[in-house]
Amino acid sequence: MNAGPGAWAFEEHAERLSQALWLPISTEPAEYCYLLGWEGVEPPDGSRLFIPWEAIRVAADKRRVAEAFLQAQVTAPVTHLLETPEAVRAVLTDEPSREWVLKWPTGCGAGGHRRLTANQPVSEEWPRPYVLQEFIRMERPEVYRLYAAAGETFGWNARRYPPGVQASPWVAHARGARYEVEGTAPPEAEAVARQALAAAGLLDSFGCVDLLPAPDGRWLALEVGTDGVFNHIDRDVGDPALAEELDRRVAEAFWSGIDGAPWRPGPWRPWLPGS
């Protein structure tokens, strides 16, 4: 389903999903649907969503992600949710051994994030609560990602800046970083990823989690992502086999609760409309 004023942002992704899931694109709610664009503040009435509505909302807001991680005790960088500039400055003053970043709560690609020190002003206009998170310094900036569909994790890869591209501490695809397939996820990273996805309500449908290796050897969950309403998971992963695996696993997960996936009795393959 792709409807509402934001539907244009999902058009290309909707076409891909239509072929992967063997479903036409619709602007009307169905009994069971994969939700992309939607204008309401509540989920479509009477529809069962493949990716839960609340999980979509959590993934779109770093304040909600931080709350979910803190409640579930997910291994993550030290994070504070604070209501006033004075509270932010108090943390910066009391914990000077750490570096800190103030996260813009609804941005993508690290848009709006600010590095902060104790003598820098804190905007009164920033959305509350403030998400103040420890900045993990890395000699070569990189972020690792693991995906999950129907409770199974897969697709361990990393985002890095290729040679010739100016690196940024914010390792975002939109800033020039590119994905590199890394093989099998370390067991410790997979455990943290599953914990993070479960906390956000995404483990049993479809989502991804970004992680960092900490200097002490732990793996830290940064945030989660999913498809729908506010954003979608990047499929431009630099590896055709992984991109196809993403399509296949999402399709199999979507149809797992329904008799008769439309590509059967053969193995999954993309649907070409009109064929």
Image (tube, rainbow, N blue to C red):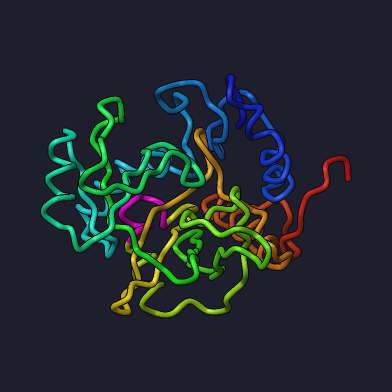
- Drawn side of residue 80 relative to residue 262, left or right: left
Q: How far from the left and from the top, in percent, is residue 187?
A: 40, 79
Which residue is found at the position 37% from the left and 44% from the top?
Answer: 114
> Residue 120 at what x, y percent from top left?
26, 41
Is residue 63 found inside the magenta-colored segment of the image? Answer: no
For image coordinates 50% across by 63% down, the residue present is: 145
Residue 188 at x, y = what percent?
36, 77
Q: Which residues are magenta?
A: 196-203
The N terminus - image quarter: top right
Question: Which secondary structure class fits the magenta region best?
Answer: helix
Residue 31 in picture, x, y percent from top left = 53, 32
Query: Is residue 240 placed above or below 170 in the rendered structure?
Result: below
Along the line of sight, the residue nearer the viewer: 260 or 103: 103
Relative height, residue 185 to residue 161 (above, below)? below
**Residue 34, quarter of the rendered image:** top right
Q: Is residue 174 above or below residue 165?
A: above
